[in-house]
Image (tube, coloured by chain):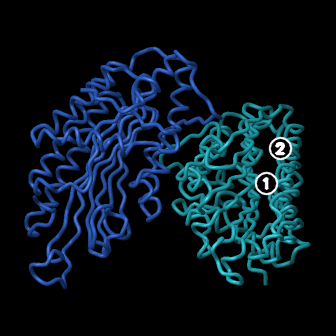
Chain colours: A blue, B cyan
Amino acid sequence: MNTGSTPSGAVDTAAVKTYLQGLQARIVAGLEALDGTPFLTDAWQRPEGGGGISRVLEEGGVFERAGVLFSHVTGDKLPPSASAHRQGLAGRAFEAMGVSLVLHPRNPYVPTVHLNVRCFVAAARPEAAQGTPDAEPAWWFGGGMDLTPYYGFEKDAVRFHSVCRQALEPFGPELHPRFKKWCDEYFYLKHRGEPRGVGGIFYDDFSELGFERSFAMTRSVGDAFLDAYGPIVERRKDMPYGERERDFQAYRRGRYVEFNLVFDRGTLFGLQSGGRTESILCSMPPVVKWRYAWTPEPGSPEAALYTDFLRARDWV
Amino acid sequence: MNTGSTPSGAVDTAAVKTYLQGLQARIVAGLEALDGTPFLTDAWQRPEGGGGISRVLEEGGVFERAGVLFSHVTGDKLPPSASAHRQGLAGRAFEAMGVSLVLHPRNPYVPTVHLNVRCFVAAARPEAAQGTPDAEPAWWFGGGMDLTPYYGFEKDAVRFHSVCRQALEPFGPELHPRFKKWCDEYFYLKHRGEPRGVGGIFYDDFSELGFERSFAMTRSVGDAFLDAYGPIVERRKDMPYGERERDFQAYRRGRYVEFNLVFDRGTLFGLQSGGRTESILCSMPPVVKWRYAWTPEPGSPEAALYTDFLRARDWV
């Protein structure tokens, strides 16, 4: 098993960066075609090293708020919180890059969606003795996508999960069930006893296939996004809705805020460590409502979300 | 100086509880008189010990969402995170009680306000040798109030701070500047480089005046609330406003959400440790908006909030 330490030549971060920037451009083009509105482009530099390109759409035809973000951040000292599962990397020079998106459609029948693919490299320690683990860079990939409907449709959940499974299939049959379960566990609101939505896939600290295959797997996940989500948007975007559905959507979006601000590692790490606030909080919905101790009427379409969709299920 | 360890007889938690329940009732009565709408009453029990009474108003005449909460929680083992400043208390039996409120008015010219007064007692360790610190209960008070305008008025900020100062004056002239500074530091959004509002007072781990005087000071803070805030509501609640002001209010309320979910110790501790979610999240505003990289037009009334009010100032 490859542990994610390789001779430095094997970690081709330039290729990862090229892929990620291309992925951002392709996804934005796909979403612009769906929406009919161009995304704005906001490039930024990080004083401590690196920067990013935020592509943002607000008040579009389909998307009320959408952010597709690329960032490439470098630093002298890896913060201890950067890796949940790896010992001994804190303090190394590092490089992190990724594409991250959250799309908040206006029509409550179109689900919200999230995608992230990222690559992390901790440099070798210059002073380390040859042959010791510290003498080699450590790297890993992470990523996934998950779907958050307001009104659930089995067909949509099945499609999303099927495309996720297909994307992982070439890399081993055990990956999809593992990453699906990881997603169900990660995107869970403990204080509500509720999953964030119908799930998808999630993985982190991934290097076990070696650099080339782990990168290929991550590409397969990124490349699958438009195929997983686009047809769902096409199917739902012209469904008629009224104030009731908009209201429920705004209420349920509160859960998205709660998850991202209370539990999401990336969001918290970013906000607490001086990340770019406006990019990180691109995931916040455009309009959100909270109300006290509200529950949907039993038997209503809103209740069906809780009973039929907000529970871990085998969708494919 | 009293360190907050006393012979057990001196910690009269029954008196604190009686005071807090009375305070909740008086504040709710005062707010009902201002609003013209009765608050609902929601009593709840905590399976692990204790419970509370949540008084909530939604869609009132003045308040779009308001929660005035009493809770009294007991436990076998104090979590290490309960006290930021005290060593050696983790694992003791404990008792915590408090009144907490957040009021979100509908009219954008009426500021949002927060009040909290609380008392914490960690029991003596039964096995501790007589004369050691562990043989005595430890207790402390905490609390404060702070004001968050959407459109700032100097007169309102001055009144709020003046009443806060008067409430603390009988207990020592150094308390107000100290607690005002503590408030400015605590209610600060690091990721925005912005204070939450115009501040007020904040204190925690407070026992230095001894139990009787520390309790009296906390009563003085609680008792001052309606006098600090009520006249501001009266002055502003009938000011005409339009969509522009409502929109800015909803945007600024996003900051309130960000602070409470990312930084507020009480909220995070509650959500992560199995507190009552609907009560804790009573502080969330009813309608909130986020938008990307927005800044107010220079010279506008919205810009004045940032330049004239969202900075630490000596208001009195």
- Residue displayed at 77% across by 58% down: B117
Quadrant the C terminus of chain B occupies: bottom right
Q: Amino acid at mark 2?
A: Arg
Subunit under mark 2: B
- Residue displayed at 22% across by 28% down: A162
- Residue displayed at 37% across by 65% down: A81
Q: Quadrant of residue B223?
A: bottom right
Q: Secondary structure at mark 1?
A: loop
Q: Which mark is residue B153?
A: 1
In the rendered view, does A102 fall on the left or right side of B82? left
Q: Secondary structure at mark 2?
A: helix
Mark 1 burial class by Cα count in 10 Å: few <14, some 14-19, many 20+ = some
Q: Nearer the viewer, residue A140 or A73?
A: A140
Q: Amino acid at mark 1?
A: Phe
Name the spot of residue A200 as percent of width and height, x first.
Answer: 30, 36
In the rendered image, residues at marks 2 and 1 fall on the same chain: yes
Name the spot of residue B279 as percent of width and height, x first.
Answer: 66, 43
Name the spot of residue B11 as percent of width and height, x first.
Answer: 81, 67
Q: Quadrant of residue B86?
A: bottom right
Label 2–label 1 contact, CB within 8 A: yes
Name the spot of residue A269 as percent of width and height, x first.
Answer: 42, 60
Mark 2 burial class by Cα count in 10 Å: few <14, some 14-19, many 20+ = some
- Is A161 rendered above or below residue B132? above
Q: Label 2 belongs to which residue?
A: B236
Quadrant the N terminus of chain B occupies: bottom right
Subunit under mark 1: B
